[in-house]
Amino acid sequence: MSEQTRRGFFVQAAGIAGAAALASGSGYSLRPRAGVRSRIGPTRVRAGDAIRMGVIGPGGMGTGHCMSVLGQVARGDENVKLVALADVNQVRMGSTAAKIDEQQEGEIDQYTDYRELLARDDIHCVLIASPEHWHAKHAEDALMAGKDVYCEKPMTLRLDQALRLREVVKANPDRIFQVGTQKMILPKYIAARRVIDEGRIGKPVWSQTSYCRNSPDGEWNYYGLDDAWKPGENLDWKAWQGYLYRADREWDPKVYARWRRYSEFSTGIIGDLLVHQITPLLMALENSVGWPTRVVASGGHYIDKDMDNHDQVNLNIEFQGEHTMIVAGSTCNEVGLENLIRGQKGNIYLNGRHCEIRPTRPFVDDVEEERIECPDIGNDQEGLRLNWFECIRSREMAISNVDHATKVLVMVDLATRSMWEGSAFEYDPDTMYVRKL
């Protein structure tokens, strides 16, 4: 990585003062100001009524969510009405709106300014599928506007944003907030959590997981470019950049469509791929291990030399509860690590659909080998979104909540810092203090 890229990452990740503190090794606190309590109450769904939903960012993932919701409605899984879309790209938004209009009655409304969507008092909830650097702002504004929120993963781009958003969610406990890490809903991880909490494998000492692909043409280059996109005519390039706007940044359709390849807008493999694996694994371990406190990671450009973000990453994460998680990510080799939780007395294997418990050799007489059969729940993303809809009606906390997602962002953010700076980083959950070691 060039020094310019490293400096750019830390200036926008931590602020100039924070970047200077990390460079000197002194560290700094990420404690946010007090969370804001909204004066607007949530728009509750009356029994028997449809949940009226808006979508911010109907691009590839956002459009997928829309089509999937319509499928759930057609099957009778839930009663949901897609009411409005918001996107700075009128071409893409118009295409998604046309697909929706074909499948539900009435034309869906379209806004180029998401704040107009949030200002409507007839919308119960908002699904956010914008790029990572917009997640924090879109989610906070939606919560403050009285909406229940489903925010795509990762919850935010940077750790300070996650801590701020957590404060806002805590200050507005009458909102339903769900983060879109769909493997949280898989029964095998829920079963593993119960096994660990019951003490059946003894103290969990270390775990391992991975998300590996092999993308010869470059990961995320499969997102196509459209000559119909015309900045200043049907696409607001400045608005898309948001707080990362630079006057000297010329229009680049590759950055716009393939932003996951660029470190300024995404953490790449870590935030886009690895969160799928580390999030449910942490959920299974959470009551035993607590917060992540120390992370060291390495990454490189072994095949995809053109990508700004790394194509190979390896993470070592330590937790309060004396546990280490080993994580590998790659877009140049698809063979990953076993999904495995290792305890002193037994191990939990999570490679397939089921949860398998096997004793370690010294404890074969104490731990019974068992295969916990887990049901096939079908599409896990639809399952997680259905959990959100159910919670919107019941007002119970969603399964993929803000506390869990914030712990994940500690891992993501510190690993990213570690790879860029070549040092380990630690986090104190009590003071919210980050220190370069």
Image: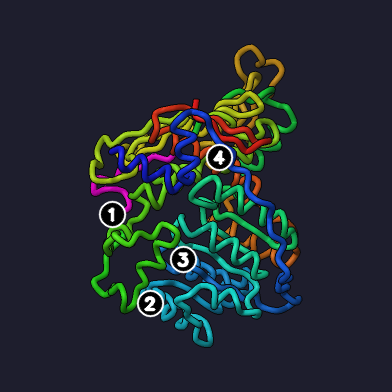
Crowding at label 2, few (<14), some or many (≥20) Cα neighbours within 10 Å?
some
Q: Is residue 172 above or below residue 103?
A: above
| Marks 2 and 1, how far apart at CA | 22 Å
| Residue holding disc 3 | 62
Crowding at label 1, few (<14), some or many (≥20) Cα neighbours within 10 Å?
some
Q: Is residue 207 visible?
A: no
| Marks 3 and 4, how far apart at CA | 26 Å
Q: Of callouts 3 and 1, which one flags the residue occurring earlier in the amino acid sequence?
A: 3
| Marks 3 and 1, how far apart at CA | 18 Å
Residue 56: percent from the left, percent from the top?
50, 68
| Residue holding disc 4 | 410
| Residue holding disc 2 | 90
Q: Of callouts 2 and 3, which one flags the residue occurring earlier in the amino acid sequence?
A: 3
Magenta stretch: helix, strand or loop mostly: loop
Residue at 29 percent of width and 60 percent of height:
248
Discs 4, 2 touching: Cβ within 8 Å: no
Q: Amino acid at mark 2?
A: Gln
Closer to the camera, 323 or 415? 415
Checking the image for residue 221, the label placed there is: 1
